[in-house]
Image (cartoon, rainbow, N blue to C red):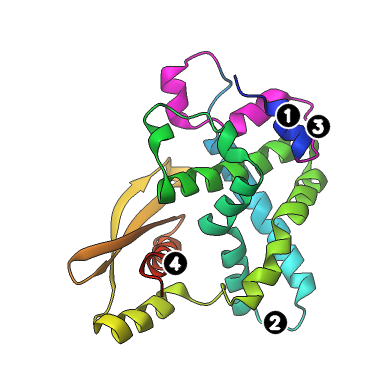
Amino acid sequence: MKDFKEFADSIGVTFNDESLLQQAFTHRSYLNEHRGEVRGHNERLEFLGDAVLELATTHFLFEKFPEKPEGELTAYRAALVNAVTLSDIALALGMNDHLLLSKGESKDTGRARAILLANAIEALIGAIYIDQGYDAARHFIATYILPKIDDVVAKRLWQDAKSTFQEKAQEHESVTPTYAVLREVGPDHDKRFVVGVYLRDGIVAQGEGRSKQEAEQDAARAALEIRGW
């Protein structure tokens, strides 16, 4: 079994209930191959952690940018908590080495692994919140996630990815992108949409989000990265 206490020490958190930490790293698929070994999968913790992350991030942005309008603050928040940013942070924290996945899921790389990591760091926030309360969860978010805002602003990562991709697609290929829902995953209380973005008849990238609009933005960001635009 992986050393979760070592991970907790590395992020400066001492869990009262270490099984919560292990659960935060457990993907649903792992349970099918290891029944009875772990407390449960991380989807409920992820659902909770997402809400805690949104509140802490919203409060931070509200205070940091007192002159910014609501629309711009919303764009900043989306750029801070999207799958790309969160998965990069999770990788830097070494979370990839602790994920509990099925043999099939463990083979996923690239975009699929990034989404698993983003989900896991949200579940980790949920686990900290349950174990130690909001202040501890907010401290973790303030330490590892909120400092990314300087990069978001400097590189204009908050700008509308769909609009940018459409401009670049028309400029480079004289075509307007289209989007289609590929599948819906998760329970009704925490449903996620997987969307594909297409140029002509070929799919360029996929994105995931809690709404179709969020998934389209995620797909557009991935497409910009893939095309190098």
Q: What residue type is labelled 2?
A: Lys
Q: Position of residue 154 (x, y in %)?
A: 65, 77
Q: What residue type is labelled 3?
A: Thr
Local packing at callout 1 (Cα closer than 10 Å; few below 14, some 14-19, many 20+) is few
| Secondary element at image label 1 | helix
Local packing at callout 2 (Cα closer than 10 Å; few below 14, some 14-19, many 20+) is few
Decide which of tag 4 and tag 1 comes sooner along the chain. Answer: 1
Residue 40 as seen in the image, left or right of residue 110: right
The residue carrying mark 1 is 6
The residue carrying mark 2 is 68
Residue extending farthest to the left is 201
| Secondary element at image label 4 | helix
| Secondary element at image label 2 | loop
Q: Which amino acid does label 1 sit on?
A: Glu
Rounded to the nearest angstrom, the CA distance separating label 4 from label 1 is: 34 Å
Q: Where is residue 34 in the image (x, y as percent from the top left)?
A: 47, 17
Local packing at callout 3 (Cα closer than 10 Å; few below 14, some 14-19, many 20+) is some
Q: Where is residue 147 in the image (x, y as percent from the top left)?
A: 73, 62
Q: Can residue 153 be seen in this view?
A: yes
Query: In front of the other: label 1 or label 2?
Result: 1
Residue 214 as seen in the image, left or right of residue 141: left
Say the numbered circle drawn on residue 221: 4
* Residue occupying image coordinates x 58% and y 21%: 39
Give the residues in magenta: 11-37
